[in-house]
Image (cartoon, rainbow, N blue to C red):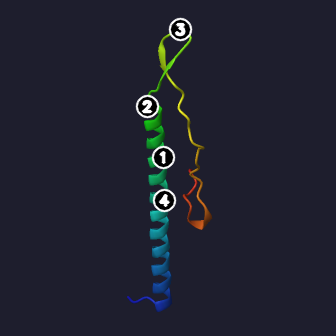
Amino acid sequence: MFFHPDTMLMMANEHRRELIAEADRFRLLKAALRTRRENLRQDKEVVSVQSASGRERPAPAARPAAGTLAGCGSRGVAPAR
């Protein structure tokens, strides 16, 4: 069975868009994971600070502004169900 050339072109374009969307999702999740790991690494770094009682305690870690996982444009991540 043969498809009409326009149908084949439509299917190829749709498949290409799906592959691009999947790559975008992968990049977005990879960036979010990298940011999370960096934040956890910063939290684990202990800087000794003397408290009033003389005991050492970890200093509060400065956190960068929180990012968002919200997609942009038509190729964003699908909403959770």
Q: Are marks 4 and 3 in contact (CB under 8 Å)?
A: no
Q: Which residue is mark 4?
A: 25
Which of the labelled discs sits on residue 53, or is there none? 3
Question: Distance of mark 4 from mark 1, alpha carbons?
Answer: 15 Å
Mark 4 or mark 1, whichever is nearer to me: 1
Q: Which residue is mark 1?
A: 35
Q: Residue at x 56, y 11 (%)?
A: 52
Among the 4 quarters of the image, the one containing residue 65: top right
Question: Distance of mark 1 from mark 3, alpha carbons?
Answer: 35 Å
Question: Distance of mark 4 from mark 2, alpha carbons?
Answer: 29 Å
Question: Distance of mark 4 from mark 3, alpha carbons?
Answer: 49 Å
Label located before the other in sequence (1 or 2): 1
| Residue 51 locus on image (x, y percent) | 54, 14
Question: Distance of mark 3 from mark 2, alpha carbons?
Answer: 23 Å
Q: Quadrant of the N terminus?
A: bottom left
Q: Which residue is mark 2?
A: 44
